[in-house]
Amino acid sequence: MRRLEMNMRAFPAFSAFRPLSRTTPRLLPLVGAFAAAAAFALPAQAQSIDAGRQKAEEVCAACHGKDGNTPIDPSYPKLAGQYQDYLEHSLLDYKHDRRKNPIMGAQAKPLSRADIRNVAAYYASLPGTVSNHADRIGR
């Protein structure tokens, strides 16, 4: 055992393999509190859809339609029913000039990270009119 302890001191990477210390039981309430806080944070995401609707009406509806399915120009995408992570990624790319479009860049730049999450959650929650190829061929 003494040799093992020397190796642990000599190689700090081995310290992760030592037996649980006497302080570990004191950390359990802290871990439990963190887990409870994380569980209560999940419902807050559902409330962001309403904030996303408000922001979408202010910023997006003029071009993409109030319902996200009726853009003013056929070349503009329908946003309703799109995947939330896709919308977030796209808006962040426009915001940080990784995607180039003067109109979308100007719209995305003032949006906060929370605004982007909320707008993406709102459009993802709407029924979309876009179908995949399997739907069109009758599968």
Image (cartoon, rainbow, N blue to C red):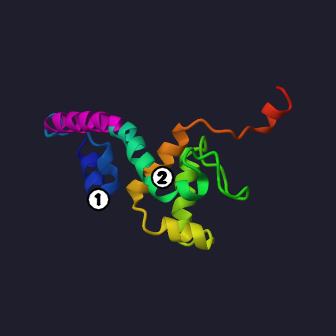
**Residue 64, image x and y in percent?**
60, 54
122 versus 112 height, above or below: above
- Determine which residue is flagged by label 2: 56
- Determine which residue is flagged by label 1: 10
Residue at the extreme top of the image, as rendered: 139
Q: In which quarter of the image is residue 99?
A: bottom right
Magenta range:
26-43
Quadrant assignment for the C terminus: top right
**Residue 28, image x and y in percent?**
19, 34
Residue toward you, 53 or 23: 53
Residue shown at 33%/39% (left/top)? 44
Dot 1: what SS? helix
- Can residue 95 be seen here? The reply is no
Tag in front: 1 or 2: 2
Q: Residue 139: which numbered mark, if any? A: none
**Residue 116, image x and y in percent?**
45, 55
Residue shown at 57%/66% (left/top)? 104
Quadrant assignment for the N terminus: top left
Q: Main secondary structure of the magenta part?
A: helix
- Can residue 137 be seen here? The reply is yes
**Residue 97, image x and y in percent?**
56, 72
21 versus 58 height, above or below: above
Decide if residue 86 is on the left or right side of residue 112.
right
Q: Disc 1 and disc 2: Cα gap in Å?
A: 58 Å
